[in-house]
Image: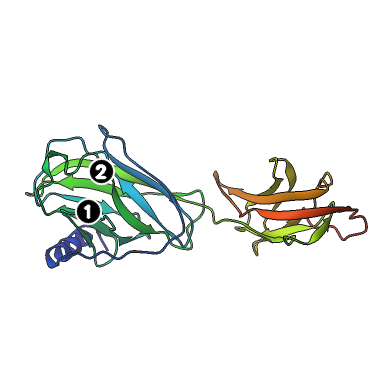
Amino acid sequence: MSRSRKSVALVGIALAGAIAVLCGSSPAVAYAGEPGRELWGAVTIGPGRAGVVEVAGYAGPPLGAGSALTLTAPDGVAVTGVPLDAAGYRGALARDRGSGMYTLTGSAGAEAWRGRAFPFVLAVPAYAVPGTRLRGCALWLTDVSGMVRQRGACAVIVGLPEPKLTRPESGVPLPDRPEISGTAYPGSQVTVRDAAENKVCATTAGTDGTWSCLPGPALAAGAGRLQATASLNGVSAASEQIQIMVGGTSSKGLSKAGR
């Protein structure tokens, strides 16, 4: 749908009343704009997931009831929620989920749009490539007459799904060079580190997302911890940590895993 048609749909919903569709999502990194600068927001969201971008940065004169903040999402990204929990604002979504809006309904005084972050929930498609910046996220704030008072942009970066460590299992006595394996985004570089941040082993996830590697130096005997980090195209994500117990048994004779 064209931007003009999105705007028409959005206004129709705004007149009909508030629509706020909250979306359960995995944590996403987000930050708001700085006062005195243009409207701004940024968020990193993994493929097929949702996250919240917080928009701020208005530094203009006070605007009264009927003024509105609009976010238009990049192509393929849906605006699925406007979850601001504050009196005096009404949230609305376009029918095609291509944009969202907050309208000032009460008298919030001179600081109605200043010193506050406005959250929009964005859903990134599963086919989005990690490390990509999705273009076309636009922001604008209008007064009651519809005149644009300030514009801006938001950065939507496609993040990397967290890798998983499936072997070794926690609580099971291990040899000093156990096979370590798991899953990660296909083609990502996977590095496993211990509790002291020492590199244990590294490999590349296959096209099916699986990976495995063997420690270079033998693991120290006793209690330890492992964590996998995946990286691709400038973005990275870490797995949950697993607790391990190394019994000091030699792993010679075990089949080697691919590197």
Judge left or right: residue 147 versus residue 95. Answer: left
Residue 72: name its quadrant.
Answer: bottom left
Q: Position of residue 151 (x, y in %)?
A: 22, 42
Neighbours of disc 1 within 10 Å: few (<14), some (14-19), many (20+): few
- Residue at point 89% right, 60% down? 254
Judge left or right: residue 172 versus residue 16. Answer: right
| Quarter occupied by the N terminus | bottom left
Neighbours of disc 2 within 10 Å: few (<14), some (14-19), many (20+): some
Q: Can residue 211 be spotted in the picture?
A: no
Look at label 2 and name its amino acid. Answer: Arg
Look at label 1 and name its amino acid. Answer: Ala
In the foreground, 12 or 56: 56
- Residue at point 73% right, 62% down? 169
Judge left or right: residue 86 versus residue 105. Answer: right
Q: Position of residue 120 (x, y in %)?
A: 31, 54
Q: Secondary structure at mark 1?
A: loop
Q: Can residue 205 be spotted in the picture?
A: yes
Q: Position of residue 32 (x, y in %)?
A: 34, 42
Contact flag, marks 2 and 1 (Cβ < 8 Å): yes
Q: Which mark is residue 86?
A: 1
Residue 105: name its quadrant.
Answer: bottom left
In the foreground, 97 or 87: 87
Q: Is residue 61 above or below residue 78?
A: above
Q: Secondary structure at mark 2?
A: loop
Q: Is residue 15 above or below residue 219?
A: below
Q: Give the residue at mark 2.
A: 116
Q: Position of residue 155 (x, y in %)?
A: 38, 45
